[in-house]
Image (tube, rainbow, N blue to C red):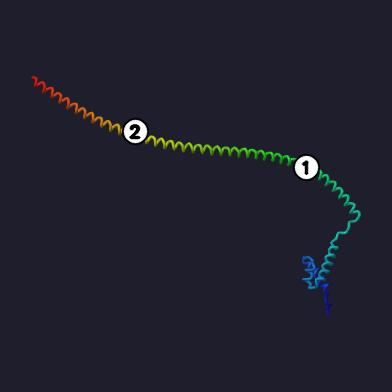
Amino acid sequence: MAEQQTPEQRAGEAAEALAAGGTAVTARAVRERSGVRMSVAVEVARTWNDREAQAEAVPAPPAAVEARFVALWREAVAVARGEFVEARTGWQATVERAQAERDAAVEDVERAEAERDALAERLEDAGRLHASAYEALTTARDEARAETVAAREQAASAETRSREALAEQRSRADKAEARAEAVAGERDRLLAERDGLRDANRRQKG
């Protein structure tokens, strides 16, 4: 008859299976896989992780290796410091050039902004002048139109008055001509009557 496994054994096998499957060995995972109490799962998971951590720990190096490592480390630090100083000098020059370029760019931007502001002001002045010129042109055009209309009305009125005056003068001339004709007729009648009386007087005397 096979010996029955204890909860700790089942939990230990569950931890091994979890690790083999690439799953983290936690108390919850051990409990779900083995069915043991949480307290057992917690203890087994802690023990298993501690053992694995100790197995993976790196032992202290021997004195000879440590001495060689210290020498190599000092040499590496010296080289790194030299490279750092050289790099820092180079980077400082680069930073100074970048700052100079930035200052030049700032000056260019300020000049461009000043030119932009001046141009905007000139454009605003030109806009005001254009508006004033357009207003003056509109006013002059309206005045010219009004003057033209007034001149046309005056010309039409003068033409009407001239036509009326001419008609009146023609009427007066016609009346004068009629009176002249009447006067001439009366004159001719009187002259004829005078001549008749004169001839009658001559015949009486003769």
**Residue at image location 84% in from the left, 61% down from the top:** 56
Picture layout, residue 25 above or below residue 65: below
Q: Where is residue 14 in the image (x, y as percent from the top left)?
A: 80, 70
The N terminus - image quarter = bottom right
Tell me the element at label 2.
helix
The residue that mark 2 highlights is: 162
| Residue 56 or residue 35, whichever sits in front | 35
Which amino acid type is marked by label 1?
Answer: Gln
Which amino acid type is marked by label 2?
Answer: Ser
Q: Examine the image and state in which quarter residue 200 appears.
A: top left
| Residue 20 or residue 108, whichever sits in front | 108
Q: Position of residue 29 (x, y in %)?
A: 78, 68
Left or right: 195 in relation to 171: left
Picture layout, residue 30 above or below residue 143: below
The residue that mark 1 highlights is: 92
Q: Where is residue 181 in the image (x, y as percent from the top left)?
A: 22, 29
**Residue at image location 85% in from the left, 46% down from the top:** 78
Q: Examine the image and state in which quarter residue 7 appears.
A: bottom right
The C terminus - image quarter = top left
| Residue 71 or residue 46, whichever sits in front | 46
Residue 166's mark?
none
Left or right: 198 in relation to 167: left
**Residue at image location 79% in from the left, 42% down from the top:** 89
**Residue at image location 73% in from the left, 39% down from the top:** 100
Q: Examine the image and state in which quarter residue 106 appears.
A: top right
Disc 1 and disc 2 in contact, CB within 8 angstroms: no
Of labels 1 and 2, earlier in sequence is 1
Q: How far apart are marks 1 and 2 (CA)?
A: 101 Å
| Residue 125 or residue 113, whichever sits in front | 125
Q: How crowded is mark 2: few (under 14 residues within 10 Å), some or many (20 or more)?
A: few
